[in-house]
Amino acid sequence: MTAKPNILVIGTGGTIAGQGKAAVNTSAYLCSVLGIDEILDTLPQASALANLRSEQLLQTGSENFNNEHLLAIGKRVAEVLAQQDVDGVVITHGTDTIEETAYFLHLTLKSAKPVVVVGSMRPPSAMSSDASLNLYDAIAVAAHPSSHGIGTLVVANSEIHTARDVVKSNSFKLDAFRSPYGALGWVIEGVPHYYRRPARAHTLDTPWFPERLSRLPKVEIVYGYGSLETVAVEAIAANAHGLIFAGTGNGNIASHLLKPLRDAARHGVNVVRASRTGNGIVLRNGAQPDDEYGWLTVDDQIPQKARLLLMLALTQDADTNALQAVFTRY
Ligand code: GLU
């Protein structure tokens, strides 16, 4: 019999650390109140899967996470993954922005060891809470050899998602996490079952390291609609290195907003056309003449993931062609 792997569970808060007044409170409760040790104490079954250690890195709702939080999580996870006595990491996290932290780690960590980000839609105190099973499944995934070398994963509702694709797509249901091309696999009774692997470059195949990043460039997201005022776009563009425009449909832009966005690009802001549909490809030079306007386009990245990718790309000397290329490589 082989020795159990050593898994570090890092707590950062969220609903998985939440508490409601009554079992019926599936949506109204305090989040980020239980410490990671308290959470693990309620899950003795997990010690059959791995030798567990824990640490509390943060204790806050993930809607508060900014670039500094991402860097702090990235640096700490990079540090522990470098330790020989750590075989994998599980991060408990609010679900609101779980897809962003997970994608940041997926793009920056330099390790093949499994890293799993997990949350829950209902607090442990609620009826039919998903907290303990999601955490048990996350530990099972992090402890399993088949999870090596496939980047950062998000585990929820018995599914294993790649951080690149997963998105929270519902505000309250247990079945909230979606990947446009499907999950990588499932977890059942503590055993992961994989059916596909990530196709795009990640972790060891990227030029970014959390420990080498001291700050991230300012990239904003603007959500497009027909009455969006020019002054709003101008004000945001005036103070940004990059601007992801979540346009309608195929990244389309209302006629009156073309000027402020073209002006922004002339002044050195990296303007990226994305789509507010949440799905699909934005075709370069399709809805707008991007070459002529000096704009970039996402491939299939949703705006919040495009923001992370552009921030990382802007930490390096990159011309327009190199910036455009990151959207098809990662
Ligand atoms: N808004 C809180 C957060 O993102 C709770 C949501 C959740 O964890 O499901 O941390």
Image (spheres, rainbow, N blue to C red):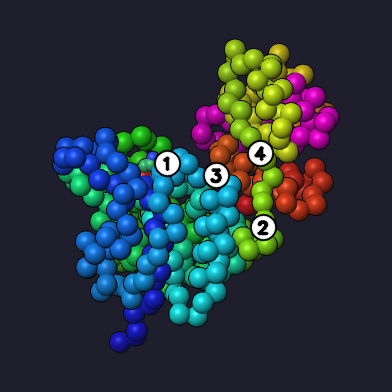
For the record, the magenta segment spans 260-287
Give the class, few, some or many, for how many residues have Cα within 10 Å of label 1's Cα (few <14, many ≥20).
Answer: many
Q: Amino acid at mark 1?
A: Asp
Q: Nearer the viewer, mark 1 or mark 2?
A: 2
Q: Amino acid at mark 2?
A: Leu
The residue that mark 2 highlights is 213
Quadrant for ligand 1 reads top left
Residue 219, disc? 4
Choose the circle earlier in sequence order: 1 or 3: 3
The residue that mark 3 highlights is 66
Q: Amino acid at mark 3?
A: Asn
4 and 3 marks in contact (CB < 8 Å): no
Q: Is residue 215 left or right of residue 90?
A: right
Q: Position of residue 195 (x, y in %)?
A: 41, 59
Observer able to see residue 260: yes
Tell me which corner region of the image, top left, top right, bottom left or bottom right, holds residue 79: bottom right
